[in-house]
Image (cartoon, coloured by chain):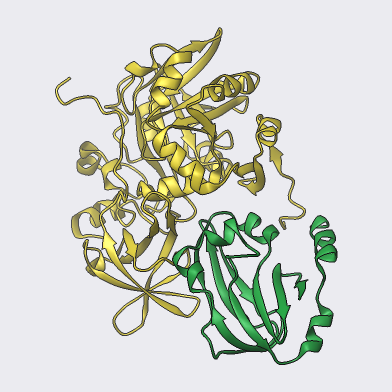
Chain colours: A yellow, B green
Amino acid sequence: MSDSTETLAQLPLDAWHRAKGGRMVPFAGYEMPVQYEGIMAEHLWTREYAGLFDVSHMGQLLFHGPDLDTELETLLPGDLKALKDGRLRYSMLLTEDGGIIDDLMATRRGEHFYLVVNGATKHGDIDQFRSRLPSTIVMDHMKEQALLALQGPKAVDALDALVPGVSELSFMQAGLFHWDGKPLWISRSGYTGEDGFEISVSSRDVEALADALSADERVKPIGLGARDSLRLEAGLPLYGHDLDTETTPVAADLTFAIGKRRRNDGGFAGADRILAELASGAISRRVGLNVEGRQPVREGAMVLDAEGNEVGKVTSGGFSPSLQRPIAMAYVPVALAEAGTAITLSQRGKLFQATVAPMPFVPHRYHRKPQGA
Amino acid sequence: MSLYFTKDHEWIRVEGDVATVGISDHAQAALGDIVFAEVPEAGRTLSKGDDAAVVESVKAASDVYAPVSGEVVEGNAAIADEPSLINSDPQGAGWFFKMKLSDESELGGLMDEAAYQDWCKTL
C-alpha cells in the first residue's frame, strides 16, 4: 500500500491542531502535527516551560484475568510482580528469540495492568498479546481514550493548577484524578527527559482539556519534530529506528529494564539468549555519538572501522537544539562502545568524525523521590 | 537585473554575466530551522542540474542544484557561520553562491517571480 492510497485516521484533536497552526503529516497511520511555530523554538520552549504533546496515536491497553502478573511476565522481562499499585515501569515486548517487538510503559492499576505501546506498532502488539496470552487474560484496547503529554519544568505547576494533587506524584507514579468532573488517569512520566505527565482522557473530553491546559501562558502545543529531538537529547531510543526485532535489550543498552529476579530466574521470551548476552555481552551496542562540525549525521549513515569496513550504523541523528551541535545514536561493535572512542561515519559519500558519548546528552530532570523517603 | 526561479525552489539573480543563487522563501519555510549549509568553492565548474550546495534543517537534508551552467566565483561564507540567515533573509544575505554564466540561453527555461508564485500555489 503506497502512502497516496493509505487512509489516514484523524486524531480526536485534529481540528484543534489545525486551528493552532499545526503542520500535519502522515505518521503511524494518522495525520499528526509535526510542528507549529518551528521545531527549534518548540524544543527550547519545552526545556524551559511546558510543552503539550498529543500522543493519542499510541495504543492504550488494559489487561485483567487470573495470574495476570505471571502471564505478562512470560512476554515482558520486567519485574512486574514487584510493581506496586499505581507504579509504572519501562518494559519491552519480546520475540521468542529475544528481539524487541515494541517498547512500552506498564502500570499496575489495581487488579489491572495498563500498557501504553507505540502507535506504529500497536496493531501488531495486540495480535502478539492475543496469540501468546491464554484466553483467560482479557485485553481491552481503549480506543476511546486520547493521550496527552505535558512535559517541561513548568508542567507540574501548570497541571497542578487545573488538577490539584498531581504535584504529589513522583517520577513513574500514577493515579486517577478528576478535572471538571471528568476522570483523568495521570502518570508522572514522559519521553523528553524533562519532568512531566502523561494524561489519559476520554476522546470526548480531550479538546476541552487541551484548551484548558494551553490557556496557561506557560504551555504551548509542541509537534512530533521537537518530540523527536527532545528524546534524542535525552538518550531515549525510538522504536522502529533505534529498536526493532533484530535488536535485543542487551544490544540496545536497556538492561536496566530487566529486574534482578528475572535475571536469576529467566522465564521470559528470549531469556536463553538475553541471559547469555547479559553474562558475556552482545556483539554490538547502542551508543551516543558527539559528531564533529555542524553538519548533522542522520539515520542510515554507516559506522566504519579503521580499514573502512562498515561495522555499524546510525539509527537516529540530528541537530541538538539545546547543545547547538549534531548528536546521534548508533550501533557499534562492543570494542568501540566505550565513551571517548573515536568513530568514523560515512554519509552520502562523505566522512565524519565522532566520539562515543555518555547518554543522556542533556541531563534528565525527572522528579524522583528523595532517597529514603 | 533579472530574477528567475526553478521548480526545485532555487532563485537566480543575474547582473551582467554573473548570477547569484539561493533558495526561495517558500523553500526555507518548508525546510524550517536551518542549521547547516555547505556552499561550493570558487573555481568549481557546474553544469545545469548538478548538486551545488547542501542545506540541512533540524529534521532534513536537501541538495541545492545549479539552476544554470557556469563557474563558481564565490561561495557565501556568511551562511556557513550563520545558517539562520537563510531563514531570515533567503533572497538577500542568505544567498548561497555566485557563478559566471557559460550559457545565457539556459535562463530562458526558468520561471519569473510571478510564474513561480503561481506554481507554488499548485503544490
The residue furthest left is A372
| Camera-nearest residue between B38 and A188 | B38
Q: Is residue A101 shown to the viewer in this render? A: no
Q: Is residue A134 above or below residue A177?
A: below
Residue under the point 53% across and 64% down: B56
Pick the quarter of the image with the C terminus of chain A: top left
Q: Number of numbered discs present?
A: 0
| Camera-nearest residue between A161 and A250 | A161
Q: Position of residue A271 (x, y in %)?
A: 30, 48
Q: Is residue A25 above or below residue B47?
A: above
Q: Is residue A91 above or below residue B59?
A: above
Q: Position of residue A171 (x, y in %)?
A: 32, 28
Pick the quarter of the image with the N terminus of chain A: bottom right
| Camera-nearest residue between B66 and A61 | B66
Answer with left or right where residue A9 lies relative to residue B71. right
Answer with left or right where residue A373 lies relative to residue A171. left
Answer with left or right where residue A183 lies relative to residue A46. right
Residue under the point 37% across and 62% down: A330
Q: Is residue A200 shown to the viewer in this render? A: yes
Q: Is residue A203 above or below residue B49?
A: above
| Camera-nearest residue between B9 and A3 | B9
Instruction: Using the rendered view, name the quadrant where residue B32 is placed.
Output: bottom right
Q: Position of residue B49 (x, y in %)?
A: 69, 82
Answer with left or right where residue B32 lies relative to residue A104. right
Q: Position of residue A59 (x, y in %)?
A: 54, 35
